[in-house]
Image (cartoon, helix red, strand yellow):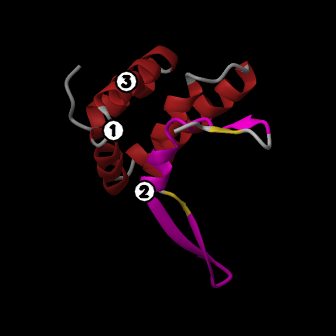
């Protein structure tokens, strides 16, 4: 299958880690209108993973700050901690390894909190 669309002179490119957000939808209502957003646990994990691919330092920092701050908040709630564990365990092994590496590299404090909250061994 050729991913290019020759008439438009463009080619399709996979959006890595987007499937994480699509797998964990959360339906909310805003003024009685349903709005589907990713579950916060999936959002945090996806932000850590994509931050490593960012070339622009400002975007990378923004992703990491968002992931760390929201991640800390989620880890303070037992239900959300379980959701983060569930999302993390369903990742491909390669993605899980990358998640741990990025967490540990950019925020060892959060990494330790994450590992401890999920009852994992390092």
Helix, strand or loop at label 2? It is loop
| Up-down relation of residue 31 to residue 24 (above or below) | below
Q: Residue furthest top?
A: 105
Q: Is residue 30 left or right of residue 71?
A: right
Q: Which residues are magenta?
A: 9-36
Question: In which quadrant is the C terminus drawn?
Answer: top left
Q: CA distance from mark 3 to mark 1?
A: 12 Å
| Magenta residue check for 14 | yes
Residue 58 coordinates in the image, percent (x, y): 74, 24
Disc 1 marks which residue?
Answer: 91
Q: Classify residue 11 as left or right of residue 101.
A: right
Crowd rating for badge 3 (residues with CA inside 10 Å; few <14, some 14–19, many 20+): some
Look at mark 3 in the image and give the residue it sits on. Answer: 100
Question: Residue 20: image x %, image y %?
Answer: 45, 46
Residue drawn 74% across the image and 39% down it: 6
Question: What label sits on residue 24 in the rendered view?
Answer: 2
Q: Residue at x 60, y 37 (%)?
A: 3
């Amino acid at each position: 299958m050729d991913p290019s669309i020759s008439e438009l002179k463009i080619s399709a490119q996979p959006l890595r880690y987007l499937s994480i957000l699509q797998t964990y939808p959360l339906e909310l209502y805003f003024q009685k209108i349903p709005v589907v957003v990713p579950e916060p646990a999936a959002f945090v994990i996806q932000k850590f993973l994509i931050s490593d691919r960012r070339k622009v330092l400002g975007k990378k920092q923004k992703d990491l700050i968002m992931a760390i701050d929201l991640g800390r908040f989620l880890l303070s709630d037992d239900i959300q901690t379980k959701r983060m564990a569930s999302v993390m365990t369903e990742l491909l092994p390669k993605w899980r390894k990358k998640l741990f590496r990025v967490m540990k590299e950019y925020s060892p404090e959060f990494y330790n909190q994450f590992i401890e909250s999920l009852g994992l061994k390092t």
